Amino acid sequence: MNAPSAPPAVRTTCPYCGVGCGVLAKPDGFGGAQVQGDPEHPANFGRLCSKGSALGETLSLNGRLLSPMMRGGSDMLEPASWGAALDSVARGFQETIAKHGPDSVAFYVSGQLLTEDYYIANKLMKGFIGSANIDTNSRLCMASSVAGHRRAFGSDTVPGCYEDLDDADLLVLTGSNAAWCHPVLYQRMLQNKRERGARIVVIDPRATSTSDDADLMIQIAPGMDAVLFSGLLVHLAEYGQLDTAFIHGHTSGFADALARARHIAPSVEAVAERCQVAPACVETFYAWFSATEKAVTLYSQGVNQSAQGTDKVNAIINCHLATGRIGKAGMGPFSLTGQPNAMGGREVGGLANQLAAHMDFSPENVDRVRRFWNAPNVAERAGLKAVDLFEAVAERRIKALWVMATNPAVSLPRADAVRAALRQLDLLVVSDIVANTDTITAGAHVVLPASGWGEKDGTVTNSERRISRQRAFLPPPADAKPDWWIISQVATRMGFGSAFSYASAAEIFAEHCALSAFENNGTRGFDASGLATLSERAYDELAPTQWPRDEAAAAGRKRMFGDGRFHTPDQRARFVTVENPALSLSKERYLPLLLNTGRVRDHWHTMTRTGKSPRLGAHIDEPQVSVHPDDARSFSVADGELARVLTLHGSAVLRVSVTPAQRRGEIFAPIHWNGATASDARVGALVQPACDPISGQPELKATQATLAPALYAAYGFLLARDAVAMPDGVWWARSTVEGGVGYRIAAPVVGGHWSGVAKRLIGGGGSRVELLDEGQGCYRAALVQEGRLMSCLFLATMPHALPSWEWLKQQLAAPVLSDAARRALLAGRVADASDLGPIVCACFGVGRTQICNAITSGRACSAEDVGAQLKAGTNCGSCLPEVRRLVAETDKPTSRVTA
């Protein structure tokens, strides 16, 4: 069948990280899309990372929430009409407020929302319900940056822009694995290093792909960033590297901040001891920073996700203020935002301690917002921040909760306690695109189907204050609706219709921009007044633009504070006296290890989008824990085996990856797996609830932990066309593979009973082959239909007795199973040399075996050669560090063979 003619490509914005890459999406006529980078977008100039490149593979309706659902008399979620669902939500909130007051209800929203959605949610809760109990999952990633900016600058304003990464001569990355988490920007930094000779310093407890390219790696002890940067401030003062004119003319508080820094970090030797690094590393960093005027310090979750995150941010900013390196080309502190619209959410007041348009809860701001919204019931004080909000749910102080576009039962600290708390709510409403999340299964009463990326229309703001359009290029499926429409409909049913009678996202955006200008007069950093009168057509055609964008400006301002004027009452930047750093642990140390959490290269959040892509699941396809070799020996765990990670709050079973990249005494586990993708790998359940006292951001980088072997009788794989329900007691991790789904499994027993289990798991019909060898401790079964492998199950008491996982996935993807492959399935051995090995390059599906073969054959002697031969590393570049390691570690022939 010929595909219908496809419409032209639509310019939109990537829905992943805060880089905010421009995307050209061209619908394919079958509900999907071809995706490529937008060469005209100033955030990426056409480059996309592996996740962005695979967006077209994530648009299927598999697992989508397609109609409103309500819990019925059978206590099961059942389909409902929009009218019934919206009436139920509005009535539930009204009754709760009438009985218990406005602070008995809350919204928990997300950096995945568009600015227009965020604005309406904030307006309803803070303006008309009259409570500030609306917080966002951005609290988990950017709140410390917000607090640090506001303390230093008087506003939540990122001073610089991406062009500074091109102009800098020194790039300092602290708490950031940008090579994996912000790869498009990182490739820009590497281009600067290649072409201009810029130096790169990486400060991180872990050696990462980012540190592979560093000129200096400081493998710092957890939580000691403020010590290192306090020491830098002392060094700058002692060696006469201060900009005294800037300090005296444009700042306040320097003497106190320097005195505190001298108390925390009196000498290089003291810094080195507390940071547990060599003094030479500290001296080199300080010397480079002192001698290099054009220096940018980029920081991300390793700084923010800390019980001292705000102080870390301010310790960094102090050094830039002390040298006047702010608001000028190639210099300044730069926060790398985690989510696609964390910045936009901050603009509209998505955080519980903010009002809209970057205003706080001062009486004059409350009055200003009240008059603009014509809302007599505006909240007058800050609401509950994320962790406190869910503690209030557990304590029954919050009785009705609306969760939008996020999954707190996975992502929040003490996630098991969060899940239990959700079950106690009188009303739990969830708006999502996914039908089955841990939050929904915790007991949602009403579930509302939201439009997803490619279906909804609005704006997002990236890390450099650039507002970009997300445009719809696909129709919303079934009953899915935009979030702003859903919220407005509930507001109308609650009696607030006149304030929520929007016909489009463009109307909401115009109001948002108008509020940013209302009685501003240059006192607030966020000003988008120049966009407040856009017509619907002009909104549709809006090109990426940075704020502030006032009425006089034809384009936004690239950099802020270059004139030495800040948004404090006296227009001076403030130096901040930071507290003496200390990890937020129990007074007594109960467990021997520290658990650090974070992201992997090709996945995002809880994988509701990336988990649909076979190539994104190929690089790391199961939950892992990284362990130093010495710790692996101490705790009797081995590379490739399973281990149980235990903390004072929960446990999980993860695959062990032994690596010297970890410091001794520290382990690392990724956050992405949830109840739908693994049996026992919700890492949020392990994390302590301690938070930064200023920002409310939780400490996700240092939780007391221990390890123990997780022993099973058998290990194996299951591949099938569709998802299956695993037997009780079986550990499993699921990933999408070409042609179906794959499960890595571990079972408590292996024996004859698996024959009956296999019939249910791999299905019937077709030609079924089966082998049980109890003496050798192995079981194999496969189902072949019309010459094609439909499913297979392999179990063995020893993992090395299993066939290649990558080879098995190739057989499931193959249109026809060869005779040799059919025999190999029963034999449990790879039949030929077609095994790609574990995937290294997700963009082009290049495996480790392919790369190593190219090296050993002499066809490739460098990463550039590998790219030329196999394309690996030639798109987003995030696999290049691994390719370089393979080139360095793989034996090469004595003479090169010319291809």
Image (spheres, rainbow, N blue to C red):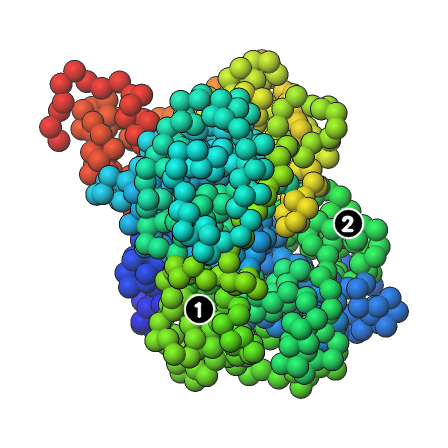
Residue 247 visible in the displayed image: yes
Position of 85 compared to 459: left or right?
right
- Label 2 sits on what residue type? Glu
Position of 355 compared to 443: left or right?
left
> What residue is shown at x 70% (from left), y 71% (from top)?
363
Disc marking residue 897 = none
Position of 219 compared to 394: left or right?
left
Distance (Cα) linking label 1 and label 2: 37 Å
- Label 1 sits on what residue type? Pro
The x and y percentages for residue 182 are 41, 47
> What residue is shown at x 71% (from left), y 34% (from top)?
650
Q: Secondary structure at mark 1?
A: loop
> What residue is shown at x 49% (from left), y 22% (from top)?
269
Residue marked by disc 1 = 548
Label 1 vs 2, first from the N-terminus = 2
Residue marked by disc 2 = 391
Q: Secondary structure at mark 2?
A: helix
Asked which quadrant contains residue 369, the reply is: bottom right
The x and y percentages for residue 13 are 41, 62
Asked which quadrant contains residue 327, the reply is: bottom left
> What residue is shown at x 69% (from left), y 37% (from top)?
688
Position of 14 compared to 433: left or right?
left
